[in-house]
Image (cartoon, grey):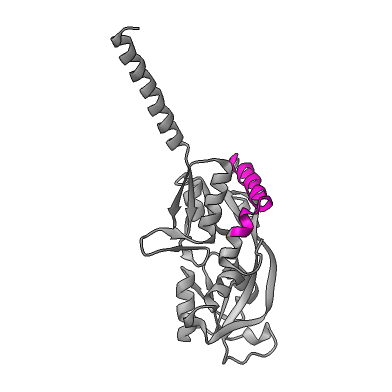
């Protein structure tokens, strides 16, 4: 082989490797997560997403041996962004609902959710749900919490909806709302904070048979890939390891 032939072969191999790299990058799975939902996802001081959903997303990608890119996406419009291919999947504590299932496909669940009421310890309530009537009650907009509140109490309480969970907590602590309907696990996490020492769960859990799953576009093969990976990280103990970082009880 002449020197010219060797150079040509090296150039050709380099082109193939570069092409393979570009192709791999092009096929990287983009995963959207809303970073305003502690402890499932928050943006740290360096602007990086951290939390349960982030760790689960990374574990699933490792299990699938897939290149993934996690992007921060506000909750409002997150399904629209998926449909127009801004990203390929949502791993952001999204509950499976009939309405959402008409727009996207869902994997098997990666945790189960119940709702709860939060209020000040000093707030004396009678029997629920009647004790809610006439009060100012908040919820995170476009969630199963707000849907539950609007479906069951639209004409019985003064509803206030928030664009993120943190603003709902701020209004609760400031007394601008009397009660907050929330997913239980982020509420439990907030109750561990200094700001929440004067607050508590009110009444029993509100079980709406809620399952949280990965959302993908209709017809995407990623539905089966994520479902398989979820089952595998549950079976091999990786899921439990992540769970224990955030909660002293199982949320699966």
* 162 to the left or right of 113: left
Q: Is residue 74 visible?
A: no
Residue 160 vs residue 115, the one in the foreground: 115
Where does residue 58 sit, x and y in percent of width and height?
52, 50
Residue stretch in magenta: 220-241
Is 89 located above or below residue 178 in the figure? above
Give me the residue at 49% from left, 77% from top.
Answer: 169
In the rendered image, which quarter is residue 93 located in?
A: bottom right
Residue 217 lies within the magenta run: no
Where does residue 90 sit, x and y in percent of width and height?
53, 52
Residue 236 lies within the magenta run: yes
Give me the residue at 53% from left, 48% from top.
Answer: 89
Q: Quadrant of the C terminus?
A: bottom right
- Number of residue marks: 0
Q: Main secondary structure of the magenta part?
A: helix
Give me the residue at 46% from left, 65% from top.
Answer: 36
Q: Is residue 30 visible?
A: yes
Where does residue 59 sit, x and y in percent of width and height?
56, 50
Residue 28 vs residue 151, the one in the foreground: 28
Give me the residue at 47% from left, 40% from top.
Answer: 28
């Amino acid at each position: 082989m002449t020197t010219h032939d060797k150079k040509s072969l090296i150039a050709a191999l380099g082109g193939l490797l570069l092409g393979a790299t570009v192709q791999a990058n092009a096929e990287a799975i983009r995963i959207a997560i809303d970073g305003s939902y502690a402890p499932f996802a928050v943006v740290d001081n360096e602007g990086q997403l951290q939390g349960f959903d982030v760790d689960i997303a990374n574990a699933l990608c490792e299990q699938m041996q897939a290149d993934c890119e996690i992007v921060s996406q506000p909750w409002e419009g997150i399904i629209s962004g998926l449909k127009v291919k801004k990203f390929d999947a949502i791993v952001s504590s999204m509950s499976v609902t009939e309405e959402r299932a008409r727009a996207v496909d869902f994997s098997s669940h990666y945790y189960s959710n119940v709702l709860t009421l939060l209020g000040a310890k000093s707030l004396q309530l009678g029997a629920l749900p009647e004790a809610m009537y006439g009060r100012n009650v908040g919820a995170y907009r476009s969630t199963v919490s707000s849907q539950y509140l609007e479906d069951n109490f639209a004409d019985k309480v003064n509803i206030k909806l928030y664009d993120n969970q943190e603003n709902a907590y701020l209004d609760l602590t400031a007394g601008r709302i009397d009660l907050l309907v929330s997913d239980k696990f982020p509420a439990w996490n907030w109750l561990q904070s200094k700001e929440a020492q004067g607050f508590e769960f009110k009444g029993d859990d509100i079980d709406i048979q809620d399952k949280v799953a990965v959302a993908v576009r209709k017809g995407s093969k990623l539905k089966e890939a994520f479902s398989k990976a979820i089952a595998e990280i549950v079976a091999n103990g990786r899921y439990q390891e992540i769970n224990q970082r955030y909660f002293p009880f199982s949320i699966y």
